[in-house]
Amino acid sequence: MRLIYIIGQILRYKEFLLTYKTRGHRIKHLEDYQHLFPIKSSTTLAGIVADLICDGNLQGDPKWRIDFTSKSIKELKRFEKEMIVLFNIKGKIRKCTTNKFGKTYNIAFNCAPITRILFLCGVPAGQKVLLKFNIPKWIKKDKECFRRFAQRVFTCEGGLMHEKNRKMPQIRFNMHKEENIEDEFIGEVAKFLEKYFKIKSTIKKQKPINSRKDNKIMISRRMYITGENVIKFFNEIQFEGEKQKTLKAKLPNLA
């Protein structure tokens, strides 16, 4: 189990209760969760937030539910273990039957109070491609929280590209949004990679695509990390799992 690096308070119990409309509902349903408060910022929580922003989904009113999807059962169990550490809650794993991109699995947590807590900690609720959202402030203000956040973001969504005419592989990260939504998130990832770790990157807009049933036009913004910045990423952020092993093998000075 990795060390949990705790920084400060994010959410108090009284603030949490105020998000419910009726006093009776608060008292009846929320006493079992009082011991979790105050919610404190930590690297573990930062990683969970990143997982849900990238490969997860948080449903808001009225069903308040958490889902996290992966091709790896091991990944789902890793995520569940961290949810148990912070919130003492277990999920239910099932095979996804509607994913046309290959075999994937989902872990679901049907717990409205915990879902609401994560929403208040900065996880967006709903269809993320149709929402404008930012990295939570408590993550941006702390180097170690951002390091863990970035590690999970790139592990979930990042990829490697090694072209024959380049000595160094590229790290790429895409974020899709509906064309009329300004995407500040990927820009903030780039900003704080440079602020905290001197990792420079480039962001380029890709061609608009129309692949949705509602005919909304999507635009992908792609971040590129190249050259010596890839080595900085390898040393400072790192992927988790097989992607890190692949990156190490492709780096000329480390292979």
Image (cartoon, rainbow, N blue to C red):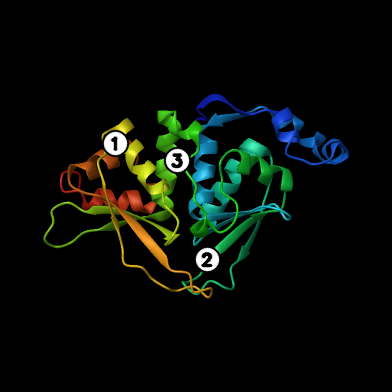
Residue 253 placement (x, y as % from top left): 16, 44
Residue 140 falls left or right of residue 173:
right
Residue 2 in sight: no
Mark 3 residue element: helix
Q: Which mark is residue 57?
A: none
Q: CA distance from mark 2 to mark 3?
A: 23 Å
Residue 86 shows in this picture: yes
What secondary structure is marked by label 1?
helix
Instruction: Check disc 2 and report the residue beneath it.
Output: 104
Residue 171 in the image: x percent, y percent? 28, 52
Give the Cα separation between the discs numbered 2 and 1.
34 Å
Horizontally, residue 25 falls left or right of residue 139, namely right
Q: Which numbered disc, 2 or 3, marks the residue that appears first in the sequence? A: 2
Is residue 122 toward the left or the right of residue 195 in the image?
right
Which mark's residue is nearer the viewer, 1 or 3?
1
Residue extending farthest front: 180
Front position in the image: 42 or 205: 205
Instruction: Residue 227: give x, y in percent of width and height.
Output: 17, 46
Q: Residues within 10 Å of mark 1 (few under 14, many from 20)?
A: some
86 relative to 214, above or below: above
**Residue to which mark 1 is pinned:** 194
Q: CA distance from mark 1 to mark 3?
A: 14 Å
- In the picture as drawn, the residue positioned furthest to the top comes out as 8
Q: Indicate the amino acid at tag 1.
A: Glu
* Mark 3, residue position: 149
